[in-house]
Image (cartoon, grey):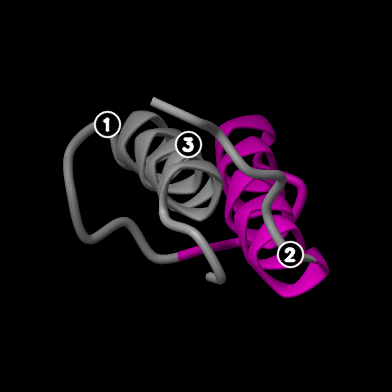
């Protein structure tokens, strides 16, 4: 399988979601908790977005 670099947009979306996970974990700003272990799931979603951007060509 050939991997491609993600576009800047995909990278920035992943970065924003990951930063939201960190901010939620540290409690810097109040973010309503909708899920148990919300930080973990936000970090997983950020990783999946970045992984999808690397695997799918042209995304």
Q: Residues within 10 Å of mark 3 (few under 14, many from 20)?
A: some
Residue hosting label 1:
37
N-terminal-most mark, 2 or 3:
2
Q: What is the secondary structure assignment of the residue under circle 2?
A: loop
Vertical position of residue 18 compared to residue 20: above or below: above
In the image, what residue occupies the spot 65% across and 42% down? 27
Q: In the structure shown, which secondary structural element does the residue marked by tag 1 occupy?
A: loop
Q: Which residues, given as a range, are shown in magenta?
A: 8-31
Q: Is residue 10 left or right of residue 2?
A: right
Q: Which residue is mark 2?
A: 7
Observer-nearest of 5 and 32: 5
Q: Where does the N terminus fall, quadrant-wise? A: top left
| Residue 57 lies in the magenta-colored region | no
- In space, the residues marked 1 and 3 are separated at their CA atoms by 16 Å
Q: Is residue 25 left or right of residue 8?
A: left
Q: Label 3 near label 2: C-beta < 8 Å?
A: no
Give percent across and percent down for residue 28. 77, 47
Along the polypeptide, which appears first: circle 1 or circle 3? 1
């Amino acid at each position: 399988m050939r991997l491609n670099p993600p576009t800047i947009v995909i990278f920035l979306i992943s970065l924003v979601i990951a930063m939201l996970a960190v901010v939620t974990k540290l409690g810097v700003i109040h973010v309503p908790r909708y899920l148990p272990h919300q930080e973990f799931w936000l970090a997983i979603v950020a990783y999946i977005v970045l992984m999808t951007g690397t695997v799918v060509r042209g995304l």
